[in-house]
Amino acid sequence: MTAKLTLSALLLGASALPMTAHAKEAVDLILHDGKVLTVDAAFSVQSAVAVKNGRIVATGGENLLDRYSAGQVIDLHGRTLMPGFIDAHLHPIPVGPSDINPLVAHSITEIQDMLRKKAAELGPGKWITGYGWQEAALAEKRNLTRADLDAAAPDNPVLLVRAGAHSAVASSLALKVAGVDRTTPDPKGGLIEHDAKGEPGGIIRERQDIVARVIPRPAWGEMKAPMIKTLKGFLALGITSFHDASGKIDDEPVGQGGVAPDTPGAEIAPGEMTFARARALYAEMGDQLPRVTLYISYPGAERLKAFPHHTGYGDDRVRLGAIGENLVDGGFTGPTAWMLVDYKGQPGFRGKGRYTDAELQEMVDTSNRLGWQMGLHCIGDAAIVQTINAYAKSLESIPDPAHAPDDRRWFTDHFTIMPPEATMATMARDHIWIAQQPNFLYNLENRYVALLDDWRLAHNNSIATPAHKFGIFVAFSSDNLPVGPLVGLYAAITRKGPSGAVHGAEEAVSRPEAIRMYTANGAYLSREEHEKGTIEAGKLADMIVLSFDPLNADPQAFLDGHVDMTYVGGKQVYARP
């Protein structure tokens, strides 16, 4: 009897004890006390995020701390957390063993100092290369010439590519080695500038490959470490995914497998990632790098047919994107962008197209039949008209059993000079999108002012007209002028160049729109909208922390502010020192 009473008392006592707190769900990471821009359909703003196994578990208020426990809890102290940038067109350009870095130079004199040091390091006769000079950033405010290079490195052939990669300057020795002289005709799609005496002045527009083809190329093994450094540099800019616009299908050299040696863009440059290189690199260390969707340069019909994959093949680290590295025209850093009207101050010169209508149609149709998305480079309005006409014919005549007619997700890359309204109406009808570089307005302001009439200047790199008036889908990117999403956002919302002048205020978009175009819309371009691009439960935890509030800060904050932290798959891959 006593034993029964004792048991009853114990049971009664247990039931009378207060209920313990509900056990918290364990997660890996919680970030809270911030301004969380989810970029969901409503552009809702929260204050906390929970992450587990590389994906977002929940977003909400501070009560997430009551629901979840984490091994790592980050107090944002009011800073802004948002999806990582998805750059829809970007060229990784690593600095190789023969390179100087004119991108950081502020004068021609400084570039000459770099050349002298590199010449002393490499020795006479060795090639010196480099990328990134811009005349607007140089104290002398002019293009480099072969004389500038000769004065610094007379015993070394030199080729320095301008920012944007649409022109380059070669030294006298480089031109001699390449066999380029006053009698050399302009290559297809390119232009050799000459001085007052009729000699090549050093600048070659668009087809600098006529010199680059004779430069000994470093092995991928020499370029792998510089490429890794370049990719990690994107993380410091808040780029968690990008579309690599320099991709190739394999390592086959120029002139083999059906690729003509003079096909622009066909060559594999040092440091460019082929699909095989990308997969090997990301298999080794993909969790430390931004995710990549690889554009593919059209390699010719036979090689494309022989390649076993097409757009969409891959995983969430490396996947195949569009046929898109091929240039329908040049650019304004040449300048050779193909225009419908004469360049300002240059009667009779409208730039150059790269393809006949038949050549372009063959490329588009062949790619379409083989299951490839299209994303061709077209900068001038004439090039855009030609490209859209080719797209429209192909989309109408060649069905895609894998995708609905209104969901092919083809796009034009750049769309710098707004084409006629009839062309934009065709784009809206056929659901042809735009991968836009709003930073061009900022970084190429001097070129646009010098070369464009008032109307085209006001509507350069237009966003609002195609997006609002025609309903054309726009995703943002930065290309390589230089890479920097924050500069692109600044230009998209202000339409200001470095001079402070506003160029076409009517083409500006709101801050939420601009942010969406640089995050969620990039995911749509690669059919990954269910995987990334917004901060929502179930999606990859690709996120960045900004030092300022992009919705309310003075616009200057986009130029002066920083990315404080970058997460890819819930793993912190960058923290600002």
Image (tube, rainbow, N blue to C red):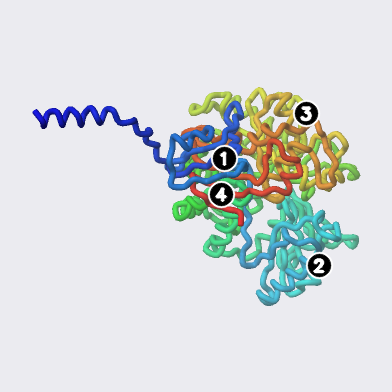
Q: In this view, does 168 lie above or below 326?
A: below
- The residue carrying mark 1 is 33
User: Element at badge 4?
Assistant: loop
- Give me the C-alpha separation between circle 1 and circle 3: 48 Å
User: Between disc 4 and disc 3, whose residue precedes?
Assistant: 4
Residue 12: image location, x then y, percent: 23, 27
User: Between disc 4 and disc 1, whose residue precedes?
Assistant: 1
- Give me the C-alpha separation between circle 2 and circle 3: 44 Å
- Give me the C-alpha separation between circle 1 and circle 2: 49 Å
Q: Disc 4 residue type?
A: Lys
Q: Which mark is residue 109?
A: 2
Is the Cβ of the residue at disc 1 closer than 8 Å to that at disc 3?
A: no
Residue 271: image location, x then y, percent: 58, 57
User: Between disc 1 and disc 3, whose residue precedes?
Assistant: 1
User: Between disc 2 and disc 4, whose residue precedes?
Assistant: 2
User: Element at badge 2?
Assistant: helix
User: Between disc 2 and disc 3, whose residue precedes?
Assistant: 2
Q: Disc 2 residue type?
A: Thr
Residue 431: image location, x then y, percent: 63, 26
Q: Residue 248 carries which label?
A: 4
Q: Is residue 359 above or below residue 407?
A: below
User: Element at badge 1?
Assistant: loop
**Which class describes the residues within 10 Å of circle 4: few (<14), some (14-19), or many (20+)?**
many
- The residue carrying mark 3 is 420
Q: Could you tell me which residue is drawn at 34 percent across and 30 percent down?
A: 19
Q: From the image, state whether disc 2 or disc 4 is nearer to you.
A: 2
Q: Disc 1 residue type?
A: Asp
- Give me the C-alpha separation between circle 4 and circle 3: 33 Å
User: In the drawing, does residue 12 fall left or right of residue 500?
Assistant: left
